[in-house]
Image (cartoon, rainbow, N blue to C red):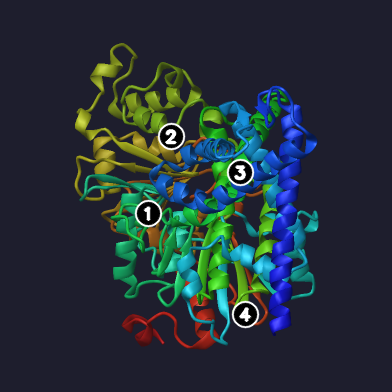
């Protein structure tokens, strides 16, 4: 044992000396290349003197990076994340200036802008050298990964013999997209799991609201009751709820906990990373629902950033990758515009930065946090990687851009799989998605007006002149005039305009639209809507870009409306699904469930769906969308180890997925989530 300990010490010292030597050589090379970087006096020095100056500078820079950098990162945790990415280079350059300033020879001199470049190159080279030397040393590899986690995690006792479980969510990756990526060789890690086989692949069906807020709330907390869409208007509160708004996330999590009767999937020794909701985890980082809480050591949503950026080499590598991704997005969007690819949406403004954050910064930080959690031996870990979903929205779910993201996500899976071998307990890795994405052009691209414009036209309200001149806009205005029996066009804006406080609120969630009338404090019925706006429901139901409507009926309780006067009560949809027939199995149950929600909109609008082409029309500016019914968006996947029990056939709804995941935690070593009285009664 003593001999082994001395060998490890000698190995560590040897690696440190090698990294120091490579850093010194890098500084010498940069000093010879860059005119504003000097490490010798103006009169010249001997080669030995120059080498000693470089060695001292490289050593001082390395020590400062190891000792001062973590303090700087903790100091800048209050800085917005994107700004922190830009500050990485400035902070690193400042450390190099300080290292040269304390050099006893007094010969180090570099311009501030050049110092940023030199520091970035030296950090990257040192990181690559250290990684290459440690690649065959398991102990060194494990120590390096430990540094990515908070130091307090290392004080935890050794992990138990029971296995831990990692749930890794690949946001927006549909079942069929995953299979296609495996067939094309884009995801060799997943392919290996399926071919051996060590894992089974199962598809499941989302609720009507096929989006991360509803799915992840149901998966983590066991209830997504009363989440009709990604955004909706609540009349009793006078507030628009948005699933990725921190205040809304807090409220939604509170409601779910109250509805389900327990804290969540991760209440027992859990960790939640990069999610909208906590799942009841003890360890939380980058979790939206805690972003509004008072900052503390236990509840700081940016703790994961410190754990990752405390290593300057990681910070520089991620920052370089960030800007490379920005350039990649600008190049790809320019190529799509030059080739006049269709469908296409605007990718200008801040979108390149948003994409780079999702595909680089968020991925790197979450993966590092997951590795730290596994090495700390947490019982249950749930993490969300949003990279694919962000790119697929703007480039398309089957685009080349999205395929590149899937390749990088697979490499993250491989890295996590390797880390599991060094964890203090065995880990079962479950990979799943919260929804898929359905391709198709936007509603506005096809018809020249938005859903909001169409609703306003159907209500007789003014719309933009461009929208008014479209075929859909003209038909809607004609329908209003016919319904009011007021022919002619002159003065119609003033003549048919209702009171301003009765104007509708129109919200979009992918290809799902919601129309609410805020001056009426209850959910309006079909009869009330017809009395106020006699042309509105007919205009919407007969529009070719709309698949069906859901409204409350005083006579039938709830009805589905379709073209040509179709009106089917909800309790008769089993015998005659009408316009829901094209939307596949489960559509009827999903619509009925949403109808029962207290905050369902006055009019729920689902876009047209082409089952032959698998396309929908998004009410948002997205060519890969999700949020409603139709196509691949409603068919996510569940990739689970064979050691776990097989999921039931026909798995439908996020709440059922929660019960499956909870059952897997129970199999590992006893109940992990309290069983509610309702579930005991059902059993």
Q: Which residue is drawn at 54% across and 80% down?
A: 664
Q: Is residue 432 left or right of residue 150?
A: right
The residues tagged by marks 2 and 4 sit, at their Cα atoms, a distance apart of: 51 Å
> Is residue 433 or residue 3 the one in the foreground?
3
Q: Residue at x 72, y 56 (%)?
A: 17
Mark yes or no: residue 56 visible: yes
Q: Which mark is residue 559?
A: 1
| N-term-proximal mark, 4 vs 3 | 3
In the displayed structure, would residue 438 be above or below residue 384? above
The residues tagged by marks 1 and 3 sit, at their Cα atoms, a distance apart of: 57 Å
| N-term-proximal mark, 1 vs 3 | 3
User: Is the residue under label 4 in contact with that under label 1 (CB below 8 Å)?
Assistant: no
Marks 3, 2: nearer the viewer: 3
Q: Quadrant of the C terminus?
A: bottom left
Q: How crowded is mark 4: few (under 14 residues within 10 Å), some or many (20 or more)?
A: some
| N-term-proximal mark, 2 vs 4 | 4
Marks 2, 4: nearer the viewer: 4
Residue named by callout 2: 451
Residue named by callout 4: 426
Q: How many labels does the image show?
A: 4
The residues tagged by marks 1 and 2 sit, at their Cα atoms, a distance apart of: 21 Å
Q: How crowded is mark 2: few (under 14 residues within 10 Å), some or many (20 or more)?
A: many
In the displayed structure, would residue 231 be above or below residue 663? above
Specify the quadrant of the image occupied by residue 256.
bottom left
Residue named by callout 3: 316
> Is residue 168 or residue 346 the one in the foreground?
168
> Is residue 618 or residue 231 the one in the foreground?
231
Specify the quadrant of the image occupied by residue 668.
bottom right
Mark yes or no: residue 403 visible: no
Q: What element carries label 1?
A: strand
User: Is the residue under label 2 in contact with that under label 3 (CB below 8 Å)?
Assistant: no
């Amino acid at each position: 044992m003593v001999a082994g300990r001395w060998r490890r010490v000698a190995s560590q010292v040897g690696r440190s000396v090698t990294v120091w030597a490579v850093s010194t050589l890098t500084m010498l090379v940069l000093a010879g290349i860059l005119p504003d970087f000097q490490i010798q006096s103006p009169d010249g020095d001997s080669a030995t003197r120059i080498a000693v100056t470089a060695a001292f500078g490289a050593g001082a820079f390395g020590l400062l990076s190891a000792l001062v950098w973590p303090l700087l990162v903790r100091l800048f945790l209050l800085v917005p994340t994107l700004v922190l990415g830009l500050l990485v280079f400035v902070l690193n350059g400042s450390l190099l200036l300080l290292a040269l300033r304390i050099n006893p020879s007094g010969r180090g001199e570099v311009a501030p802008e050049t110092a940023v470049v030199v520091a970035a190159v030296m950090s990257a080279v040192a990181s690559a050298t250290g990684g290459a030397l440690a690649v065959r040393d398991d102990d060194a590899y494990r120590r390096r990964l430990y540094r990515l986690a908070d130091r307090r995690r290392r004080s935890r006792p050794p992990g138990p013999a029971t296995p831990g479980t990692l749930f890794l969510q690949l946001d927006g990756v549909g079942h069929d997209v995953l299979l296609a990526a495996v067939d094309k060789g884009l995801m060799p890690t997943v392919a290996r799991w399926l071919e051996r086989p060590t894992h089974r692949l199962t598809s499941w069906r989302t609720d009507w609201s096929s989006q991360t807020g509803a799915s992840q709330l149901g998966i983590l907390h066991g209830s997504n009751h009363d989440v009709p869409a990604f955004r909706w208007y609540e009349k009793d509160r006078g507030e628009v709820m948005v699933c990725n708004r921190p205040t809304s996330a807090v409220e939604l999590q509170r409601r779910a906990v109250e509805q389900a009767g327990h804290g969540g999937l991760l209440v027992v020794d859990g960790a939640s990373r990069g999610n909208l909701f906590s799942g009841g985890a003890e360890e939380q980082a980058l979790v939206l629902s805690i972003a509004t809480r008072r900052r503390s050591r236990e509840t700081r949503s940016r703790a994961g950033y410190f754990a990752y950026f405390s290593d300057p080499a990681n910070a520089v590598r991620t920052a370089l990758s960030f800007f490379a991704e920005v350039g990649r997005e600008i190049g790809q969007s320019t190529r799509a515009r030059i080739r006049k690819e269709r469908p296409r949406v605007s990718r200008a403004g801040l979108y390149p930065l948003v994409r780079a954050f999702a595909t680089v910064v968020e991925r790197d930080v979450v993966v590092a946090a997951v590795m730290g959690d596994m090495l700390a031996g947490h019982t249950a870990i749930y993490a969300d990687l949003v990279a694919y979903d962000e790119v697929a929205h703007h480039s398309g779910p089957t685009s080349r851009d999205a395929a590149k993201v899937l390749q990088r996500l697979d490499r993250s899976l491989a890295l996590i799989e390797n880390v599991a071998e060094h964890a203090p307990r065995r880990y079962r890795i479950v990979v799943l998605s919260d929804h898929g994405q359905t391709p198709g052009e936007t509603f506005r691209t096809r018809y020249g007006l938005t859903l909001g414009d169409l609703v306003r036209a159907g209500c007789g309200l003014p719309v933009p002149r461009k929208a008014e001149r479209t075929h859909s806009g003209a038909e809607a205005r004609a329908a209003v005039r016919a319904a009011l029996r007021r022919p002619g066009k002159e003065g119609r804006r003033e003549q048919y305009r209702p009171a301003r406080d009765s104007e509708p609120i129109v919200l979009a969630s992918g290809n799902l639209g919601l129309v609410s009338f805020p001056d009426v404090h209850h959910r309006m019925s079909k009869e009330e809507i017809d009395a106020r706006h006699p042309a509105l429901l007919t205009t919407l139901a007969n529009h070719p870009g709309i698949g069906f409507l859901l409204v409350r009926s005083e006579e039938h309780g709830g009805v589905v409306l379709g073209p040509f006067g179709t009106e089917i009560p909800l309790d008769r949809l089993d015998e005659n699904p009408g316009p829901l027939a094209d939307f596949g199995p489960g559509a009827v149950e999903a619509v009925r469930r949403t109808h029962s929600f207290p905050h369902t909109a006055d009019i729920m609008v689902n876009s047209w769906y082409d089952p032959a082409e698998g396309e929908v029309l998004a009410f948002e500016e997205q060519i890969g969308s999700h949020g409603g019914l139709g196509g691949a968006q409603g068919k996510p996947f569940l990739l689970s180890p064979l050691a776990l029990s097989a999921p039931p056939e026909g798995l439908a709804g996020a709440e059922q997925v929660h019960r499956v995941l909870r059952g897997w935690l129970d199999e590992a070593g006893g109940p992990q989530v309290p069983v509610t009285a309702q579930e005991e009664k059902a059993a």
